[in-house]
Amino acid sequence: MSLKIMVIAGALVAAPQCFADVITFDDITVPPGFDSHVPILNGYHSFNWNNFDAFYGPGTPNTGYAAGVVSPPNVGFNGAGQPASFSSPTQFTFTSAYFTAAWNDGLNIAVQGLDGATVEDSTTFVVSATVPALITFHWTGLTEVDFSSSGGTLHPGYNGTGTQFVMDNLKVNAVPEPSSAVLVGIALALLLSSRRFNRKIIRKMGP
């Protein structure tokens, strides 16, 4: 194997690639109906979920649950307006998500990105109860993202209370296990080596 091929393979092994995943919650079975929701179970899209439910948005009009639907029909939300989180045993990038308040205009959402017990990133933003807001993070090297919500005032015409927020089209980039990157590097190195060998044979057989 040439030095050039070994360098390419080594670079692939040392720098694992990221794979984008948009989590829409629409592949969770939520019975259509008013106030219909089910817990998001651990393992969904390879994450562990704490106090997040999937909600059938169209079944509950005149709420942020319906207004917050970006890709129909489901959204995620923090149960009872309490803190919620998702996590993974391996690092990932938290890229973006759409957020809407379920009831209160001017709802505050505080978000922290952690690597183990270390807080790597944090921010607080304000959302309405009628229009989804795309919030971009691009936080890398995380194993957990924590959410808490507070404040705001009830949107006129909404018949409910609470500090729940709605989340849809959550975009994350998962970093594969090192073994996956190793296999990719080896495969490419073998492919390049094979092509180089074939070119030598063709040159020898030529006129």
Image (cartoon, grey):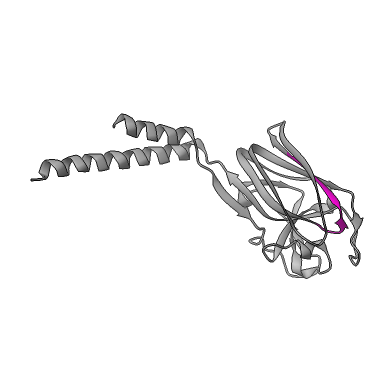
Q: Name the one closer to the observer, 202 or 80.
A: 202
Q: Does residue 5 appear left or right of residue 132 in this picture?
A: left
| Dominant secondary structure, magenta | strand
Q: In the figure, is residue 8 to the left or right of 71?
A: left
Q: Quadrant of residue 86?
A: top right
Task: Tell me: residue 52, above or below residue 177.
Answer: below
Out of 43 and 9, give the one closest to the viewer.
Answer: 9
Spot occupied by residue 63 in the image (x, y as percentages of width and height)? 83, 64
Q: Quadrant of the C terminus?
A: top left
- Give the left or right position of residue 68, taking residue 202 as reference: right
Q: Residue at x 38, y 35 (%)?
A: 8
Q: Quadrant of residue 162?
A: bottom right
Count of residue discs: 0
**In percent of the image, x 47 and y 37: which residue is there?**
179
Q: Is residue 163 visible?
A: yes
Q: Reply yes or no: does residue 107 show up in magenta.
A: yes
Can you see residue 42? no
In-front residue for pair 77/119: 119
- Looking at the rendered image, the quarter that the N terminus falls into is top left
Q: Is residue 156 above or below residue 109?
A: below
Q: Position of residue 62 (x, y in %)?
A: 84, 68
Q: Is residue 169 a member of the stretch shown in magenta?
A: no
User: In this orientation, which residue lies closer to the viewer: 5 or 182?
Assistant: 5
Residue numbers of the magenta segment: 101-112
Residue 49 at x, y percent in the picture: 70, 47
Residue 44 placed where, x, y %? Answer: 64, 52
Q: Residue furthest left?
A: 207
